[in-house]
Amino acid sequence: MKVTIFGSGYVGLVSGACLADVGNEVVCVDIDRNKIELLNRGEVPIYEPGLDQLVRNNQKSGRLTFTSDVAMGVEHGLFQFIAVGTPPDEDGSADLQYVLAVAASIGEHMTGYKVIVDKSTVPVGTADKVRARVGEVLAARGAAALEFDVVSNPEFLKEGDAIDDFMKPDRIIIGTDNPRTTELLRALYAPFNRNHERVIAMDIRSAELTKYAANAMLATKISFMNELANIAERVGADIEQVRIGIGSDPRIGYSFIYPGIGYGGSCFPKDVQALERSARSLGYQAEILHAVEQVNYRQKEVLFHKIERHFGGDLRGKVFALWGLAFKPNTDDMREAPSRVLMEALWRAGARVQAYDPEAKEETTRIYGERDDLLLCDSPEAALKGADALVVATEWKLFRSPNFDTIAEQLSSPVIFDGRNIYDPAYLKSRGFSYYGVGRGIIDAK
Ligand SMILES: NC(=O)c1ccc[n+]([C@@H]2O[C@H](COP(=O)([O-])OP(=O)(O)OC[C@H]3O[C@@H](n4cnc5c(N)ncnc54)[C@H](O)[C@@H]3O)[C@@H](O)[C@H]2O)c1
């Protein structure tokens, strides 16, 4: 089948490569010419495990092409996927300018029937806006008779596991008001739907809300555990024991109940915010969503306060080894990463940071440029050299079982601030370390 995908970011690129890999002819369109040039040279601008190879293989076969030529993109696909960003507007609601710009482009250039598939995460009612925008542009060029459908097909892939998630999805949500498009989309997704039925067809508005509901539920689990961690700390309990204790209840389960230093990334923060703002604009105060956001905001500062207290409130001239910059392991994505809040607070307090991340070095340089108070290192060990403490912000696998002798030797004093609770406090204490985790019965938080 012929597919066009607008937006070659984490979602568009993965979707395009996976759809090409099962035999479709895919054209990816992006307005970022640098990105398209890179991709046409066979370079993938983001880090996502397995994506380089998948893109290159499908490029070689001719099934996956990249262009900035919007007219060519619109001409190509029966399916016109919208996978552009929906960043927060000034008031936190979703900014739809990129989505609607694509809708206008489709209206401008289409010459026959198109299925417009909204894959970006968008507020309820966006499909109607896309339909209206396409219709307006068609009418303006005297082509109002051209037919098209708009479908909501939210994406649930996780960065770091994106290819697997796309190839073996838990569910394929198809929100339509026309059975013909449900069948077209069902056919497109058939290669990913062989093992068991994953298509869940519903009305468009419910599909749009399903995506926000999923992210809001996951963010709520994280903020809930962080809230409990802060309570555990004050009452002298260990949140890790509590986590295992409650996870054993099948109604609760073990997944996604890890305490830490807050959620980040390109989705949870903006989606919780957008859903809350969207409810508010309709006169409904979404109290839980508001609390989820507030708890997360506060949680990103928890480690800094522990550091500040440990060093008696004066961090001027101190040096911190920071392990992990990406918002989670297996990605280079730094959007809303807790490491950024921490680094910026350390800098404001007059400290310097020596950081190591397996994949996010380039992205960090892009965001912060060269600065005297940031040294980006090429190994975890190099980051430790002469530092006053080790701080873990992202739970990359290679940080899980480090050589603690090396850590103790390289640090000026043996102190670890573990923002992801990956180490055993009792073991570290027995090795002479001062250890601070999140919610681990150390009554040091106020
Ligand atoms: N990143 C994730 O893990 C994830 C998961 C599920 C859903 N989503 C949602 O998918 C959408 C895209 O997210 P992303 O992380 O891939 O974004 P991204 O920022 O990585 O990529 C968006 C791309 O769209 C391009 N673009 C903007 N306007 C364009 C236009 N008019 N025509 C063509 N290209 C255009 C940009 O240049 C950019 O390359 C968002 O709504 C997001 O919430 C993201």
Image: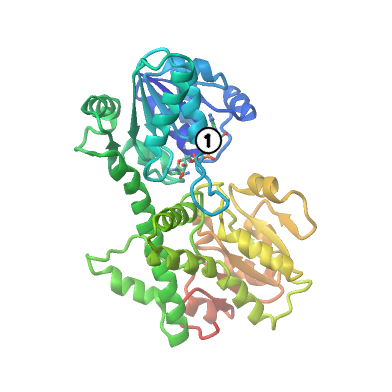
Instruction: Please tell me whether residue 118 is drawn above or below residue 345 in the rendered image.
Output: above
Percent position (x, y) of residue 129?
A: 41, 35
Percent position (x, y) of residue 413?
A: 68, 76
Q: Amino acid at mark 1?
A: Tyr
Quarter of the picture holding the C terminus: bottom right
Instruction: Please tell me whether residue 403 is drawn above or below residue 109 in the rendered image.
Output: below
Q: Nearer the viewer, residue 410 or 49?
A: 49
Percent position (x, y) of residue 365?
A: 70, 47
Q: Nearer the viewer, residue 244 or 84?
A: 84
Ligand 1 under 8 Å from disc 1 Cβ: yes
For the residue carrying disc 1, how many other residues have a C-alpha within 10 Å: few (<14), some (14-19), or many (20+)? Answer: some
> Residue drawn 61% across and 67% down?
391
Q: Is residue 79 left or right of residue 335?
A: left
Q: Is residue 231 left or right of residue 37?
A: left
Residue at disc 1, secondary structure: helix
Q: Which residue is mark 1?
A: 98
Q: Is residue 36 left or right of residue 422?
A: right
Quadrant of residue 337 within the rendered picture:
bottom right
Quarter of the picture holding the N terminus: top left
Residue furthest to the left: 196
Q: How many marks?
A: 1
Color scheme of the displayed model: rainbow
Q: Is residue 54 left or right of residue 208?
A: right
> Residue drawn 58% across and 28% down?
31
